[in-house]
Image (cartoon, grey):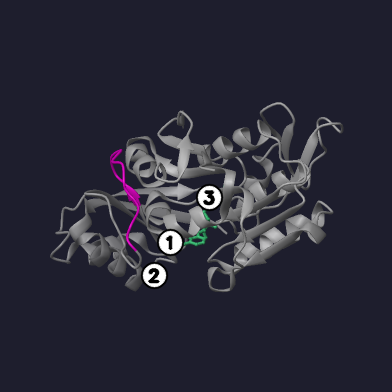
């Protein structure tokens, strides 16, 4: 099916109303994108943040009468008859295939490879995690995941118990299991993430050493290693929970933190952990350390 994209630059104040108008005029999907390059911090629960310069993008069937639609939009007060827009054809692609074609095996540190489950492994002797993230976050392409994977590759995981808080696709949990962890607990607020984590564990023949939980059912355990790649807001809010998962002398790695948020995270965790020098990848950071004895 062929599609047309209608792009309208506006402000965060009018973006919602314009999005509604596009939907009312037959747009099959409406997305909001940053019209400039403005950093956006995480929203509070239930809050939707838009950029000060927001571009509203409507997706229309190529057979829609765009001239009539644009004339109608021009009658709206928030736009006006001579509003600026860009109309462009959207190449018809198999989007799922496209994503899969662009996901390739990646090496992290010395031993660890994340390999899409539908591809051959480049090095059969490496520690290979076969992964299909499905709808969950965590392919290894995001710097926050990469920072944690490199850290994991650099420590001794053999026979350790591990908590992966915010497990997403299970990428960190599986990496720990493939590196020899005795037992891993994966926790996530998203049931689809727990499902992806379990499926990936079966795919890697490590399911018998993994248990997954929603936060409300999470067990009270003290692990040798605790990993949490969630955003800085929940890392601060859940500091007591995350810290309590780590036993004395246990190791902690945190990511999902913007570089400028590091001091706040360090201040919150320094009370119970001796922290390493933070690691930075682009705008993202990793904080790691060892729990006080
Ligand atoms: C950035 S993803 C990380 C996924 C994976 N661990 C990785 O490193 O790529 C964060 C995950 O944490 C989950 N999450 C966010 N807030 C959470 C919370 N308060 N408790 C548990 N999980 C949470 C999200 O559903 C998401 O799957």
Q: Which residue is mark 3?
A: 228
Magenta segment boundaries in residue numbering: 33-44
**Which numbered disc, 3 or 1, marks the residue that appears first in the sequence?**
1
Q: Position of residue 207 (x, y in %)?
A: 79, 59
Placement of the C terminus among the 4 image quadrants: top right
Q: Nearer the viewer, mark 2 or mark 3?
A: 3
Q: Position of residue 237 (x, y in %)?
A: 38, 58
Q: Is residue 13 left or right of residue 255?
A: left
Circle 2/circle 3 CB separation < 8 Å: no
Q: Does residue 137 appear in the picture of this structure?
A: no
Q: CA distance from mark 3 to mark 1?
A: 40 Å
Q: Main secondary structure of the magenta part?
A: loop
Residue plotted at (26% across, 50% down): 51
Is residue 40 within the magenta segment? yes
Q: Which residue is mark 2?
A: 26
Q: CA distance from mark 2 to mark 3?
A: 42 Å
Q: Does residue 75 appear in the picture of this structure?
A: yes
Q: Is residue 48 left or right of residue 222?
A: left
Q: Is residue 152 left or right of residue 49?
A: right
Circle 1/circle 2 CB separation < 8 Å: yes
Is ligand 1 less than 8 Å from the beta carbon at label 1? no
Q: Which residue is mark 1?
A: 60
């Amino acid at each position: 099916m062929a599609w047309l994209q209608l792009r309208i630059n506006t402000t965060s104040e009018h973006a919602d109303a314009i999005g509604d108008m596009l939907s009312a005029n037959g747009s099959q999907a409406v997305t909001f994108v940053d019209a400039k390059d403005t950093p956006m911090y995480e929203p509070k629960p239930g809050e939707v943040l838009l950029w000060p310069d927001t571009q509203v993008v409507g997706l229309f069937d190529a057979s829609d009468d765009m001239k009539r639609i644009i004339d109608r939009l021009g009658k709206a007060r928030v736009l006006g008859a001579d509003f600026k827009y860009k109309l462009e054809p959207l190449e018809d692609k198999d989007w799922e295939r496209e994503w899969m074609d662009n996901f390739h095996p990646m090496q992290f540190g010395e031993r660890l490879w994340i390999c899409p489950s539908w591809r051959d492994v480049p090095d059969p002797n490496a520690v290979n995690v076969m992964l299909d993230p499905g709808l969950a976050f965590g392919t290894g392409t995001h710097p926050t995941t990469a920072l944690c994977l490199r850290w994991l590759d650099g420590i001794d995981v053999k026979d350790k118990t591990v908590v992966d808080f915010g497990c997403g696709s299970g990428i960190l949990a599986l990496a720990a299991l493939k590196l020899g962890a005795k037992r891993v607990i994966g926790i996530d607020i998203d049931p689809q993430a727990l499902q992806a984590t379990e499926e990936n564990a079966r795919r890697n023949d490590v399911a018998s050493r993994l248990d997954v939980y929603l936060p409300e059912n999470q067990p009270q355990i003290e692990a040798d290693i605790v990993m949490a790649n969630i955003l800085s807001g929940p890392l601060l809010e859940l500091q007591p929970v995350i810290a309590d998962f780590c036993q004395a002398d246990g190791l902690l790695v945190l990511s999902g933190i913007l570089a400028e948020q590091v001091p706040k995270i360090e201040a919150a965790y320094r009370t119970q952990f001796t922290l390493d020098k933070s690691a930075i990848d682009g705008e993202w950071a990793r904080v790691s350390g060892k729990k006080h004895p």
